[in-house]
């Protein structure tokens, strides 16, 4: 697999629905990585698959930033993180301008398996323009983008993330079927921690 595919961990959100910084919340007993903070579990899985990964954090998130650096990520502070996920995604991609592609992961998806991230990176390395996993036919995360999307990714703003870009290029998405329900499971509110 080409070392020029970089992982981008989006960790700059404000956890409004959760009520506190969810990325610092420990995963409950009975789950993989029990006791590990959500953001740390997601970072470890990303770094295991793509060692040269970048985590995008918001200003004044020193504790989270340090935790993600300790996990092996280079951190980038997105000064305008409050504008939304698109702005954070753009900051992460701009931090790795020489990459041949980027696998965009979400820090509130701690159940995503490293092997799934490798599948997406491999699809990009083998020529996919955009790659995403599917679990039982449903598209999930992470999403990988080839170098040709650099300008579009860098121009993202607001809270839609890459949603509009994916709609415009729907015919270019290579779906990779995986046996990983973690591609669909994010943590938005405390009750999501107890869901199986």
Image (tube, rainbow, N blue to C red):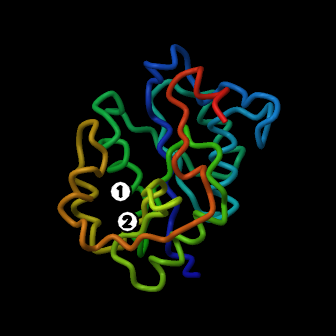
Which residue does the numbered mark 2 point to in the structure image? 97
Q: Provide residue 149's location: percent of width, then percent of height.
A: 27, 68
Label placed on residue 167: none
- Figure quadrant of residue 66: top right
Please give the name of the residue rendered at 66% of the width and 57% of the height, measured from the top-left corner. 113
Q: Residues within 10 Å of mark 2 (few under 14, many from 20)?
A: some
Secondary structure of residue under mark 2: loop
Secondary structure of residue under mark 1: helix
Q: Contact, CB < 8 Å: mark 1 with mark 2?
A: yes
Please give the name of the residue rendered at 44% of the width and 64% of the height, measured from the top-left corner. 132
Please give the name of the residue rendered at 41% of the width and 75% of the height, measured from the top-left corner. 100
Q: Is residue 109 above or below residue 118?
A: above
Q: Provide residue 130's location: percent of width, then percent of height.
A: 36, 70
Q: Provide residue 123's location: percent of width, then percent of height.
A: 48, 78
- Figure quadrant of residue 59: top left
Which residue does the numbered mark 1 point to in the structure image? 94
Please give the name of the residue rendered at 55% of the width and 32% of the height, measured from the top-left corner. 187
- Figure quadrant of residue 119: bottom right
- Check the image and name the residue furthest to the bottom: 126
Q: Is residue 103 above or below residue 196?
A: below
Q: CA distance from mark 1 to mark 2?
A: 5 Å
- Check the image and name the residue furthest to the front: 136
Q: Residues within 10 Å of mark 1 (few under 14, many from 20)?
A: some
Nearer to us in this view, 187 or 53: 187
Q: Provide residue 188's location: percent of width, then percent of height.
A: 50, 28
């Amino acid at each position: 697999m080409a070392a020029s595919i970089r992982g981008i961990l989006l960790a700059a959100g404000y956890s409004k629905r959760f009520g506190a910084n969810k990325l610092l919340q420990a995963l409950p007993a009975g789950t993989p990585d029990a006791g590990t903070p959500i953001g740390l579990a997601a970072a470890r899985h990303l770094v295991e698959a793509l060692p040269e990964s970048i985590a995008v954090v918001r200003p004044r998130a020193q504790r989270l930033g340090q935790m993600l650096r300790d996990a092996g990520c280079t951190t980038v502070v997105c000064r305008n993180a409050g504008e939304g996920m698109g702005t954070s995604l753009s900051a992460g991609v701009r931090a790795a301008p020489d990459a041949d592609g980027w696998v965009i992961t979400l820090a509130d998806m701690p159940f995503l398996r490293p092997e799934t991230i490798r599948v997406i990176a491999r699809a990009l390395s083998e020529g996919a323009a955009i790659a995403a996993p599917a679990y039982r036919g449903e598209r999930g995360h992470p999403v990988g983008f080839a170098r040709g999307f650099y300008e579009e990714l860098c121009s993202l703003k607001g809270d839609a993330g890459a949603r509009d870009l994916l709609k415009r290029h729907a015919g270019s998405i290579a779906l990779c079927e995986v046996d990983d329900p973690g591609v669909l499971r994010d943590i938005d509110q405390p009750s999501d921690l107890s869901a199986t």
